[in-house]
Each structure stands twice: as C-alpha cells, then as structure tokens.
Image: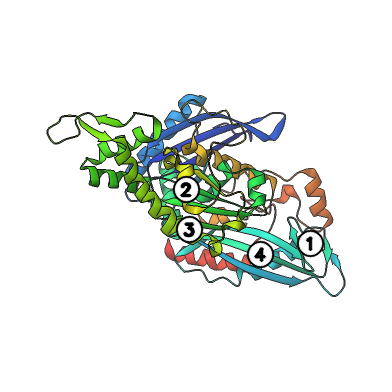
Amino acid sequence: MPKDSNTLIGLTVGTTKISVIVAERDPRSRDTVQIIGVGSAPSMGIRKGLIVNLEKAIQSVRRARREAENMVGFQLDRAVVSFSADDVSSVPSKGIVSLGGTPRQVRVEDVERVIEDAQSQLSISRNEISLHTIPVSYSIDGSTGIDDPLGMTGTRLAMDLQTVTVPSRYMQDVINCAEGAGIHVDGLDVKPLSAALGALTEEEMRAGVISICVGGGTTGLAFYRDGRPTKVAIIQIGGDHITNDLANVLHLPLRKAEELKKRLFSSDDGSVITLDGSSQSGKAIRIETDKAIDIICCRLDELFTDHALAQIPEHNPELFPAGIVLSGGVAKTPDIDNFLMDILKMPVRVAEPMDNYDMPPGCEDASFVNAVGTIKYILSKERSPYRFIDPPDWPKIHGLSGDSGFAKPLSKKTDKKNSALGAPRTEDSRGLWSNAYLTANKFWAKTKELLKELF
C-alpha cells in the first residue's frame, strides 16, 4: 500500500461475504474521497458473525484482498476492520465534574475527567472490552446539545456517554484473521456503526433515525438522535436463517435454497422460478414465487416484530421521525420497504452507498453500504476527535502498531485552540487517538491488566 495518507482501506468481515474497499482522497480536499477499488469473496469459516475456522476465514480475506489489489494495482497491507459479534452491548452512562466556583473555559483535562467519571459508572465483564466510547452529548451548567465543549465557559461540565463493548476473544480472533491474511489492523469498528455511517444522511441522523443492516448471520441496529449514535444492538437472525427456512419448507439443498433467495432478491422471474437439478432425481423443480416470498416474509416478520421492535426505546416510533433505513443483502427483498412500514408503522427506505460514491459495477446496492461506511468511519474520526474515542494506548493493548496511517493530525486551527487551552500539540501525538487525550487512564490501565491475563 502507498505510504502517503491519501489512500484509505476498509475490510468488512461478514458471515456471507468478505469485502475490501479502497478509497483515494481528492487532492483538493482531504474530506472528499473516491472509491477506486472493491474486492469481495464468499465467507468461509464464519458463522453468525463469528470466526469458527480461522484458516478458512483467512483464505477468504486473502481472496477479497487479491481482487481489490488487482483493481487498484498496488499491494494492500493495512486496513480498518469492521466486524460483528453475537454479544455486543451498548451501555449508557453519565458523568459530571465541577469547573470551580468561578466560571472558566473548559480544558482538555476537564473533558478527560468527565469521561472518566462516566466510565466509572460502568460495570464491564472481565471477558469484555470497550470497543467504542461515544460521547452522545455534553452540557455546561445545564445547557445541553453541545458537540465540542473545549473553550466554552461555565462552572459544571456534564456528559452522556455510550460505551460499546464486545467479548475480548471475538475481537482478538478478528485481528488474528486479518493479520493472518497479511493485512495489518489500523483500527476496528463494529458493523452496525459502519453500516449506519454508510447508509444515513446527516439530516436523518439529526432528526432521529434507526439504521438496520440485515447481514447473513446477524442484524445490526444503530439508533441516532441529534446526530449521535445513542444505542447499538445486534440480533442473531440474518439472511442465512431465510435460506434455511426455504430449504426446510421447500425441501431444497442449502445451495439451491441460497440460489432461490438470490433469484428472488435480484430479478423478476415471474410467478414461477425454475431451479435446475434441485430434486433428488436431478430433475428441475418449479417453485411458486409467491410461496417463496411468503416463507421469507414469515422470517422477516419474526425478526422485526419480535426482535427489532423490542429494541426501540419505549417502542415509540415518534422518537425517530426519519424512520428506518435498511441495508444489507436482505434489503433487496422485493417490496420490503412497504412490508416493514406495515409492521413498524414508521417510514422505511432501502439504502444505497451515500455521498454519490462512484462504486464499481455490481457494488452499488445495499449489500455494500457497510463497506462504504468503514471509509466514512475513518473520515469521521479524522474530522472530530469527539465522535469515537479510543484510549491512547489502544494499539499497544491489542498488539497493533501505533503508526495507524489514518488518524491524521488536527488542523492548525484546532491545534492552536488546544494549545491555548493547555492541550498537547498535534506533533506530540502518538497512537490511534492520542490527539485528543480523551479517555479514562485508570479505566484503561485495568483493561490492559485484564488482557494480559486473557492473552
């Protein structure tokens, strides 16, 4: 991979598909990128979002990597990795600190203290690790809706924090898989967040919206209000369950059931679909399209009525006026938007990769939204040091290199602002996120001790 900072690479590890996406910055603007390559390969050794056969998973990543390399014409050896897990927790907490009896400006160390106070309210299992620490909102002296408190004046700083945790061993498996395929891990993000970033508009995030990404083995949900994610969840139902239903009800081999599902999602075959060699005798079998769609709808009804709806806070759709944005392979189901509107009583749209990214042919649909979202995740971390916070020694904790290649220096304007507030200069920064010095050092020291015991 070129060593300049103009190339961004994302790796998405999914149950049915591995994707490698490569973007290049516009030389006139670091915030504008163009997709220059996409590679994908069927997932092997992965079930319900979890790696169950490391060697097979590594081979799948290698195939996707080679396909992307053939498209861009150079070696890809680093990436930010998006992955899923069967036990993701999204835990809210609140922090509050005093700035003194006399109003003064908020400094970096004040933000450190309020995050540490919010983190101290959490109880995280010994087998879990915090992957994302997300400030949802700040308030100063009761005034809410503050995105960046640095430099603002008051006597009391408070914050709402959202901490996303995953089991430590799942995260380590993902790192081992990527690096086994020759891809150094620059960072990690959980798939519901990257899917949301790839699917949602800024207007939807601010209005209130739910991103739902139905993958092969899991369904990821990300809830946004006032522009920030307020909750992340993963449901252990996905497109593979639909394949199993088709196979069981229609008495088809899994391979043919998957073919039937893809035919239903991608084309209009009329009232009957003919599959070659589906029966035990090897003769073709005719499947009524309406019957197959009914089977799919039964599973989708369970997914959204029994599981997704239960995740909506207080089951109140009015909290999310922008409704639901659906992505993932199952989003290709014919008329799924109207079907879900009847179930959830909310507006529904099917996502495509946002911001008019010029995706290669065959990659323009909802199944590649997650890959695009990984690129947007990288850009989001660059633009705002308060969007997704990593601990300063996070790379060291997880055996990653501190030379990430994607956490770029803050602007001169921001650097000057931080300097005036007593913050460290950009050129003194180290690691994935030490620009901001914004995490609870005591909490992460305990985390480091835990991981030493585990690994």
The residue singled out by tag 1 in the image is 107
User: Label 1 is placed on what type of residue?
Assistant: Arg
User: Label 3 is placed on what type of residue?
Assistant: Leu
Q: Secondary structure at mark 2?
A: helix
Q: CA distance from mark 2 to mark 3?
A: 11 Å
Work out whether residue 211 can be spotted.
Answer: yes
- Picture quarter with the C terminus: bottom left
> Toward the viewer: 9 or 40?
40
The residue lying at 34 percent from left, 32 percent from top is: 263
User: Label 4 is placed on what type of residue?
Assistant: Asp
The residue singled out by tag 4 in the image is 160
Please tell me how crowded label 1 is: few (under 14), some (14-19), or many (20+) other residues with Cα within 10 Å: some
Res 309 label:
3
Res 340 label:
2
> Toward the viewer: 245 or 177?
245
Depth check, mark 1 against mark 4: the one in front is 4
